[in-house]
Amino acid sequence: MSFASEYERLLHAALRIRLVEERVIALYPSDRIQSPVHLSIGQEAVAVGACAALAPRDLVFGTYRGHAFYLARGGDLGALFAELYGKATGCGGGKAGSMHLAAPEVGLMGSSAVVASTIPHAVGAALAARRRGLDQVAVAVFGDGATEQGVYHESLNFAALHRLPVLFLCEDNGLAVHSPRAARQAFAIDAHARGYGMPVATCEEGWDFMRIRAVVGEAVATIRAGRGPAAVVCRTERYMEHVGIGEDYDAGYRARAAAAAWKARDPLCREPELVGRWAPAITAEIDAAVAFAEASPWPAPDALLADVA
């Protein structure tokens, strides 16, 4: 498909992610999906903008809220739904589920259900790239809750000390499950990262994939120039509950007004003409991916222990 501008291309990518996750919501009550799901609805712009600033050779290490980065990076849609279904044709052979997506063929090296656990993996990949003489940036994607883990601080320190080509990319939705940032952190994420001597950019307009593309692009250019690691903090808003397909505003830990303010600036809510034009073709693509998952075989019993070290 051709687009009139980069804005339209990225809007289409964000819409595709949203419609995929809306299909996940529709399917989930049927029990066809065989794992818990952490939806990226509301946060699509971070994945779309960041991945647009990367080169194909760069590597991304994600989180359990990983559908958006999997798709923005170019992961196969049929393999995604097959994985959610627990089928053998899934990107993890039906054994990874929603929280452990990987598509190394497009540079998505893995996701994990353990908070902050892929951050040191990205640092290790950056160290390997440096030692092998590769022009490659490793991207560690994490939420604001991960910055409270010891391994996060150790990773920033090691990367800064050795001037590694790694980008620390924080999807800051201000929540760790049901706990707001103010109840958890005595530090500011961006100011803390600057303490390691690396450049840090804060993108308050986390709904704006073009702005995120520019901010991440500048950080990546700095890294490629050999100046060591950099960090980008993107403020964002998740519309759905922490895990599952509901909205959970009645839980009392967040206000619906905050999401409403975000939606007023969300391009996917502000561009009904383009959304209406593209939605039918994307829906047909999703239909085909779901049909592929439905028709795919279950893993054989002898696959249970395959790839287990």
Image: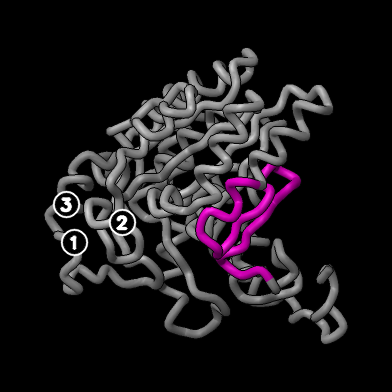
Callout 2 crowding tier (Cα within 10 Å): few <14, some 14–19, many ≥20? many
Mark 2 = which residue? Answer: 175
Q: Nearer the viewer, residue 186 or 246?
A: 186
The spot of residue 229 in percent (x, y) is 57, 26
Q: 135 or 180: which is nearer to us?
A: 180
Mark 1 neighbour density, 10 Å: few (under 14) some (14–19) many (20 or more): some
- Measured in 3D between alpha carbons, the distance from the residue under mark 1 to the one under mark 2, in whole angstroms, is 9 Å
Helix, strand or loop at mark 3 = helix
| Residue 6 percent coordinates (x, y) | 46, 25
Secondary structure state at the residue bearing disc 2: strand
* 275 to the left or right of 56: left
Q: Residue at x 57, y 28 (%)?
A: 160
- The quarter of the image holding the C terminus is bottom right
In the displayed structure, would residue 85 be above or below residue 152?
Answer: below
Please provide the residue range marked out in magenta. Answer: 96-120
Distance from Cα at disc 3 to Cα at disc 2: 13 Å
Q: Is residue 185 above or below residue 227?
A: below
Q: Amino acid at mark 3?
A: Ala
- For image coordinates 59% across by 37% down, the residue present is 139
The residue tagged 3 is 258
Which residue, given by chain and number where applicable, does mark 1 sit on? 254
Q: Is residue 90 visible?
A: yes
Q: Amino acid at mark 1?
A: Arg
| Label 3 – label 1 distance at C-alpha | 8 Å
Circles 3, 1 touching at the beta carbon (< 8 Å)? yes
Q: Going 62% across and 63% down the picture, which residue do you hit?
A: 100
